[in-house]
Image (cartoon, grey):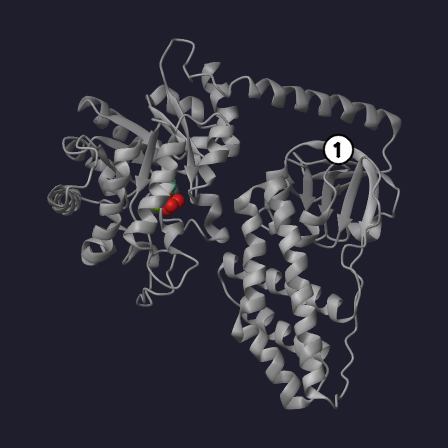
C-alpha cells in the first residue's frame, strides 16, 4: 500500500499504464547557417501552436472553457517576444542549435518562477516546462502523445501530468491518475477534479513501484493506492465504489430541489465564482444563485484595467445566466495576496493588514466608480446585489454608498437603465465588523461572513502560513461567537446573513451554522450538492 495526497474523490480498480517521460539529453551543436536554424525553430513553433490549438479544442469540450484556458496561455507564450526572442538571440549569439538555445531559455524562466514564493507563480514554471518540452519534441521530430492505445480501466501512472498530457488522454479508458509529485492545487489535481476522475498525487516514487499491466486499486478519498490487491480487497473496493457512485447519483436528484430543512426553513445554497463562465458549473451543480463573485479575477492576468464596458458585459452575462436568481457581486478586493501588474503597490510589512480592498477603492475613486457604473448598468438584466469587502466601520460603508449614489445620479442623467431597488451589503471579515454588527446592520441590506479572513484576523494566524495552520480553526469558540453575533445582529434588524468563506462548504460546520440561523451558504460548485443533502436531512 502507498499513501499520497487525495486529489480527486472516488475509487478505481484497473491496470497500470506507465507514462514515462523520455529524458532527452540536449547536445550543443555549432551551426553554420543562422537563417536555416531560425527557420527550423519557427517551424517547430508553428507545429506546437497547431498541436496546442487541437488540444485546447478537445479540452474545451471535455473540461469546459475555463480549464482549457491554460492552453491559451501556453499559446501566448509562443508569441511572447521575451520568450521566443530570447531563444533566437541565444541561437545567434552563440551560433548554437535551436534545441540548446531553447533549453537554456526554458531553464532560466523556470528558475525565475520556481524561486517565487507565490504558489500561482510556481505553477507557471510547470507551464513553461510543458511548452518547452513540446517545442523540443517538435524540433527533434518526436511525438509527445506516445502512450499508445489504452485498454479499458486504465490507471495512468506518471511522474507528473502536465495540462497537455492530461487533456490528450483518452477519457473513455482512463479511470484514475497517480503521480509522484504535486499537491492538491497542482494542475493535474485540478483537472482530475474537473473531469471527476479519482486521483492520488505526491506519491513519491510510484512510477518505480509499478509496471505496465499491474493491477491496482486507487482510493481518491483516503489518498491510498493498493498494489496487486487480493481478491478480498478487490471485492471490498468494488463495494465501496458502487456505494460512492450510488451516493453521487443520489445527490443529482437534489439539483433542482429548493433547499429547506426538515422543519421547513428555507436556506439558500449558492456558489462562489471568479470568472463569469464559472456560473455554468454552479447552475449544473444545483446552485441557487451566486453568493460571491470575486471580481478581482477580471482585473488579473492582463496589462490594463478592464473598462466599464468589459465589466458590464461580464456582470450582465452572469446575471442573465441565473435567470432572476440572486448574484452577489463583490467590488474589487485587491491587495493582500492578490496583486495587479498595472497598479503599483508599496511593499508592505503586513499586506493582509494593509492597503487592500475597500481601502484602495475609497482612495482610488476613479477605479471604484468604473466598476460601480458597470455593476449598476448590469443590474438592469438580473438580480444583482453589490457587496463591499473588508468593511471595518459604518463610515466606510456610508462612504461607499455615497460614491454609489454619485454613479446612480450620473446614469440617470445619461438615461441609462439600472435597478433602483438594488440591495447593498458588506462582508463581515474583520473582527471589528462582527463586534459592531448591530450598528452596521441598521445600514446594510445584508451581511456575508468572510470566514477565510475573519478566522485569520481573530486568531492572529496567517491564512497562507502552513506553520501556523494548526491554529487556523473555524470551530474555535471565539470564531463561532463572532459568527453567531453577526447572524443575530442581522436578524434583529430584519436583514439576512450569508457566508462565503470556505467554512460555508465545510461538512462538519454546516449543521452548527444552520442552527445559528445562517440564511445563505456560498461555496465552490463541487460542494453544493453535498451541502444541499446535509441541510435537507437536518
Ligand atoms: C473570505 O475572506 O472569507 C472571503 C470569502 O474572501 P477572500 O477569500 O476572497 O478573501
Ligand atoms: Mg476576504
Neighbour tally class for label 1: few under 14, some 14-19, many 20 plus, Cα within 10 Å = many
- Whether residue 508 sits left or right of residue 156 in the image: it is left
Residue under the point 33% across and 67% down: 347
Instruction: Pinpoint residue 522: horizontal percent, then vertical percent.
Output: 40, 32
Instruction: Please state, as top left, top right, bottom left or bottom right, where the C terminus lies in the image.
Output: top left
Instruction: Pinpoint residue 477: horizontal percent, then vertical percent.
Output: 36, 32
> Image quarter for residue 307?
bottom left
Residue under the point 51% across and 66% down: 116
- Whether residue 425 sits left or right of residue 259 in the image: it is left
Instruction: Please state, as top left, top right, bottom left or bottom right, where the N terminus lies in the image.
Output: top right
Instruction: Pinpoint residue 459: horizontal percent, then vertical percent.
Output: 36, 44
Residue under the point 58% across and 74% down: 84
User: Which residue position is annotated with label 1?
Assistant: 12
Q: Is residue 114 visible?
A: no
> Image quarter for residue 475?
top left
Residue under the point 37% across and 40% down: 293
Quadrant containing ligand 1: top left
Looking at the picture, does residue 431 appear above or below residue 208? above
> Image quarter for residue 336?
bottom left
Instruction: Pinpoint residue 377: horizontal percent, then vertical percent.
Output: 24, 41
Q: Is residue 355 visible?
A: yes
Amino acid at each position: 500500500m502507498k499513501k499520497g495526497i487525495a486529489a480527486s474523490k472516488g475509487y478505481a480498480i484497473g491496470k497500470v499504464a506507465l507514462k514515462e517521460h523520455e529524458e532527452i539529453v540536449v547536445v550543443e551543436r555549432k551551426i553554420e547557417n543562422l537563417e536555416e536554424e531560425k527557420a527550423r525553430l519557427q517551424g517547430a513553433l508553428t507545429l506546437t501552436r497547431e498541436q496546442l490549438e487541437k488540444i485546447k479544442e478537445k479540452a474545451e469540450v471535455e473540461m469546459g472553457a475555463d480549464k482549457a484556458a491554460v492552453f491559451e496561455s501556453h499559446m501566448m507564450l509562443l508569441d511572447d517576444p521575451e520568450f521566443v526572442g530570447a531563444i533566437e538571440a541565444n541561437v545567434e549569439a552563440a551560433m548554437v542549435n535551436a534545441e540548446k538555445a531553447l533549453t537554456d531559455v526554458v531553464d532560466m524562466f523556470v528558475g525565475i518562477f520556481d524561486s517565487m514564493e507565490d504558489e500561482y507563480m510556481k505553477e507557471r514554471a510547470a507551464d513553461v516546462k510543458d511548452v518547452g518540452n513540446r517545442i523540443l519534441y517538435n524540433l527533434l521530430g518526436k511525438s509527445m502523445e506516445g502512450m499508445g492505445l489504452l485498454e479499458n480501466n486504465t490507471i495512468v501512472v506518471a511522474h507528473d501530468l502536465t495540462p497537455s498530457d492530461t487533456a490528450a488522454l483518452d477519457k473513455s479508458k482512463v479511470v484514475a491518475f497517480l503521480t509522484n509529485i504535486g499537491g492538491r492545487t497542482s494542475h493535474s489535481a485540478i483537472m482530475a477534479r474537473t473531469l471527476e476522475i479519482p486521483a492520488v498525487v505526491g506519491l513519491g516514487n510510484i512510477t518505480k513501484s509499478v509496471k505496465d499491466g499491474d493491477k491496482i486499486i486507487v482510493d481518491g478519498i483516503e489518498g491510498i493506492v493498493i498494489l496487486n490487491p487480493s481478491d478480498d480487497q478487490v471485492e471490498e473496493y468494488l463495494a465501496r465504489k458502487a456505494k460512492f457512485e450510488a451516493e453521487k447519483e443520489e445527490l443529482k436528484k437534489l439539483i433542482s430541489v429548493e433547499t429547506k430543512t426538515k422543519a421547513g426553513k428555507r436556506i439558500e445554497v449558492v456558489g462562489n465564482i471568479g470568472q463569469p463562465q464559472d456560473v455554468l458549473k454552479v447552475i449544473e451543480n444545483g446552485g441557487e444563485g451566486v453568493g460571491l463573485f470575486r471580481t478581482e479575477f477580471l482585473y488579473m492576468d492582463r496589462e490594463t484595467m478592464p473598462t466599464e464596458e468589459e465589466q458590464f458585459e461580464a456582470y450582465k452575462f452572469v446575471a442573465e445566466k441565473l435567470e432572476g436568481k440572486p448574484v452577489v457581486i463583490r467590488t474589487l478586493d485587491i491587495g493582500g495576496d492578490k496583486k495587479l501588474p498595472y497598479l503599483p503597490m508599496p511593499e508592505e510589512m503586513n499586506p493582509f493588514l494593509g492597503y487592500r480592498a475597500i481601502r484602495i477603492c475609497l482612495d482610488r475613486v476613479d477605479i471604484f466608480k468604473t466598476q460601480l457604473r458597470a455593476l449598476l448598468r448590469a443590474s438592469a438584466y438580473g438580480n444583482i446585489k453589490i457587496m463591499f469587502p473588508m468593511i471595518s466601520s459604518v463610515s466606510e460603508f456610508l462612504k461607499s454608498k455615497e460614491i454609489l449614489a454619485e454613479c446612480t445620479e450620473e446614469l440617470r442623467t445619461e438615461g441609462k437603465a439600472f435597478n433602483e431597488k438594488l440591495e447593498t451589503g458588506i462582508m463581515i471579515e474583520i473582527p471589528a465588523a462582527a463586534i459592531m454588527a448591530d450598528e452596521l446592520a441598521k445600514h446594510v441590506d445584508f451581511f456575508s461572513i468572510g470566514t477565510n479572513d475573519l478566522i485569520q484576523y481573530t486568531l492572529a494566524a496567517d491564512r497562507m502560513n502552513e506553520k501556523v495552520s494548526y491554529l487556523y480553526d473555524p470551530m474555535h469558540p471565539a470564531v463561532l461567537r463572532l459568527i453567531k453575533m453577526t447572524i443575530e445582529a442581522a436578524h434583529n434588524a430584519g436583514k439576512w446573513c450569508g457566508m462565503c468563506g470556505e467554512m460555508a462548504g465545510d461538512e462538519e460546520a454546516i449543521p452548527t451554522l444552520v442552527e445559528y440561523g445562517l440564511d445563505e451558504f456560498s461555496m465552490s460548485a463541487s460542494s453544493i450538492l453535498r451541502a444541499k443533502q446535509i441541510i435537507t436531512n437536518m
